[in-house]
Image: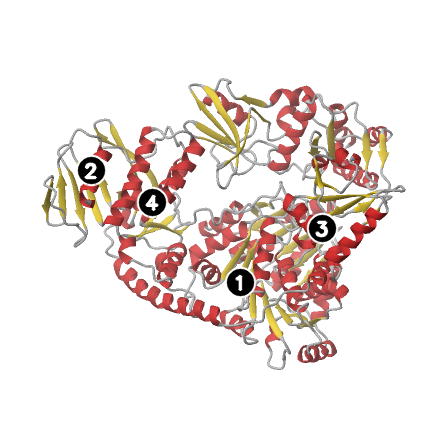
Amino acid sequence: MLHSLDPSLEVLVFPRLNTLPFDGLEPSREIAGRRSSVLRRLARSKKPVFLVSTAEAIMERLPLPASSARLSISLKVGAGYSEQELKDRLEALGYDLDEEADYPGSALFHGMTFEVFPAGALGPFRIEHSGGVIRRIAGVDPDEHDVVFDAEELHIDPMSERIALGGKRVQRAALPDYCERARWIADAGVSGHADSWLSTIKEAAGRREAEREYLGPADWKRLTRRMSSLPRKAAFTATPDFSKVASSRKALRAFVADTERAGSRLLFVAAVEDDLRAMERMSGIKAERFANWNEAAKGRGGAGALLADFDTGFIGSGRKPLVVVTATDVLGSRAHHPQPMARAWSSAFDHPDVPERDAVVVHLQRGLAVLDGLQTFDVGKGSSREMIRLAFAGDDAVLVPPADLALIWPYAAELGKLALDRADGSTWWTRRTKAEQEIQTAAKALAKHIAQRRRRRAPKLVAPGPAYERFVARFPYFTTVDQAKAIRDVLDDLASGHPMDRVVCGDVGFGKTEVALRAAAAVALSGKQVAVVVPTTVLARQHVATFRKRFAPLGIEVGSLSRATSSPEMKETKEGLRSGKVKVVVGTQAIASKDVKFAKLSLVIIDEEQHFGAAEKAKLSGLAKGVHTLWMSATPIPRTLAAGLAGFRELSVIASPPVHRLPVATRIAPLSDAAIAAALLREQRRHGQSFLICPRIQDLDPMLARVQSMAPELRIVCLHGKLPADEIDDRMMSFVEGEADVLLATNIVESGLDIPRANTIVVCWPEKFGLAQLHQLRGRVGRGGTRAFAYMLTESSSEQSGRRLAVLEEFSRPGAGFAISERDLDLRGAGDLLSERQSGHVQVFGPVLYSHLLKQASEKTNDRSADLWVPDLNLPLADLLPRSYVQSESVRLEIYGRAARCRSEDDLEDLEEETSRRFGRLPSAGRDFFAAARLRIDCKRRGIVRLDVGPEAVAATFLPGRLPKSRARSLERDGDRVFYSDNIHEPPFERIEDLLDILDE
């Protein structure tokens, strides 16, 4: 926002480390890298800087400014380039050199390019080089690999300022040393934060050690003398919120007219140009665009407009004040708020059909195998080939060309208890044939299901604008990109006139509840009823409180139906639902009881759908005819996920976390009293709360005794499902309100609870929980911007248990729920989508291939022969991407797979362009690889199963009946095979083109 007010201003944000003083833990790499980048800029800055920081960050001792300025790497267009020297320097600065550059601190080297995601950057950069010289530096989109902008110079900073500190006894500086002539301005609440942080430092270490790492009370006091404090309240009047009034256009135009009559100047402010244009249309005036705040404020005459992201408008002071009206004031929830720091962390949908190394795959002609990687071998005459090695049962292995990836699909991430097939396919064909027959049956049912859904009618539900905007305005955050899209999808479904059947898959804490709230608001404000169903009484209680808080100002009654609801309230709610007085009801399966009748039920929301059985879901979604259904889950059960992927249900994925969400640090360790006490006391020391989870009720009392003997100062409250409903509520609320440090519980707390102060969870005996359960439990912490910790304390030494916990540790970033769900889908299979069977033909093909085949079959586009063969090209050239061009084996495998999946030349051309953008100009072998891939598409279209190019002739073998008739004398025929022996001295592709031209005559 500050930068948009004055584009010439350099705005830097210096965050605090997300660790506690002296806890010995590594801070988040992203935050540590941002700090390091800011310190280098401060140390080298020649012009004024606007620095934003916190009291906690300012107190940390830092490297000397000279050290911060000296360590970073500077790359310039036209400068010399040495790959090994650069690799060594990047490694010394804390970068991972074998990781795709999609996260700060990662770098990947290719032949003529390398990509790096520098500390403090908003995205990765690609550096192109040739002849030992850097030719181009460009910022790139990490998903599409497109160039976003070019740069002449790039600074790559260390991934932590600690690298510059080196030894413990080195001389240290503080932030004021980096900005000696700065003017310091403090917000109203800074002194309170500072006092709290100073006491935390004092509790954690002795004075000498503390003052080596942090500023002391005396240092802080000296610094505060230089600070000007801001008042708690600003001397501005707020502008009206036009989006919430009945006739917003009329109200806005009247306000504009009053402003002009008063002689005041009007300034429209929005984050994007589209919103400014919408404001102009609604107000009926044309506003002059200004580049920065100073120009806009000084402007004379008519209305002005500025691109900046303000929360709300205001009226300045004076006789003819400046009147600022924002996009939020006028457009409400339709206003755009770009979030440059927001990033989707889940790659669940990035080429899900391309198999990875060491994964279990299914080869359509041979069966289950392990993809053992790429293998290069010499084929003579200085030529080499790269093949894919597949490991089958009985230690057999087969080498297949990269083009065979058209027949190879991901099956599971790990072997587990799966049995591989024989290399000759003899154990595979019986299973495959039966499964294909079942897919045809399923496809007919899917086509029928989709047709019926399109035919069925449902009321078109569109909420009244002003009332809906008043509801939305009570959401205190900006929606993330994915969250906003999910909300749009749901609102479009409700207004479509057909029953909605949508799955919203978003990780824990990613904002699924807000999607549900807005869907419920759209329906309730349209005069219809909403039922929100949750799996547990505890979650029902929290949802009731959330829904009542949001709906109360609109006068919409929210009822409750669960074990915790008193008899009089339950009776009143049922009567209200029957009469239509109660518009929203939140509860457990009690909502589906026979004595619950609705007047106008139009929407059923099923939260945490993985906890309900198929029969329960069918009963809930059938509560009323033509009802809209919204399913929500962080880790959807395999059947729901496969149904979404195959098209039975619409699917919305919320993959981008809230901007300040940090990964939950996941630790796996042996179970011990000391480990439990250390984790709980550490959280108490930073004034937070903890969950302590045991698998069984009978484990709770012994665990309580163990913890109290080790840490008697901890206030502990116990919770499990067998307690009376009132007791569960009372104990839960005492924890929510901060009356206890630790909640000792079973997995009753697994679902949906939102307690921002709880940032540590300790799970004892995690091997007794499911993978998705553990992920849900871990999602109870880390909801604020504070670094959260999940400790999995195990007594198991089994390999499988260790592997399952390793999956949890691997998927520790926000957004991992979908990846874990896919892993669960790998291991369990999706079952039969048409019945309650938990295993079925999905396990034959794996979920990705199954979804593909089912979708093809249901759309009646399945030419079965198209999936069963790949043209065999026997060409006198290397059909590969040279290792010197794309060094990473996993990336070469990805490109081979995507090329094999291309169905048209346009798709292949897009991939070829992307490859040359990512890795530099294609070498001749790379051009040959894509030419061969294009030829394969052409051969498949013509029915050519084999093409041989030898020194004497070109031979093409066709599918029976596909060889076109030709009278050309230059062709020889032998059954379904044709030979062409002219122009033998031309390059291979030209000879092939001659043959195909003759066949086309």
Q: Identify the amino acid type marked 2.
A: Asp
Q: Secondary structure at mark 2?
A: helix
Query: Does residue 998 appear to the left or right of 513 in the view shown?
Result: left
Location of mark 1 (residue): 502
Calculate the distance from the C-alpha at mark 2 to the C-alpha at mark 1.
52 Å
- Mark 4 or 3, closer to the camera: 3
Residue 125 place in picture, x, y as percent: 53, 31
Q: Secondary structure at mark 4?
A: helix
**Label 1 near label 2: C-beta < 8 Å?**
no
Q: Is residue 324 above or below residue 880?
A: below
Q: Is residue 882 above or below residue 969?
A: above
Q: Identify the amino acid type marked 1.
A: Arg
Location of mark 4 (residue): 900
Location of mark 3 (residue): 284
Residue ranking furthest to the top: 80
Query: Does residue 15 appear to the left or right of 428 in the view shown?
Result: right
Q: Residues within 10 Å of mark 2 (few under 14, many from 20)?
A: some
Calculate the distance from the C-alpha at mark 1 to the C-alpha at mark 4.
32 Å
Residue 172 place in picture, x, y as percent: 72, 23
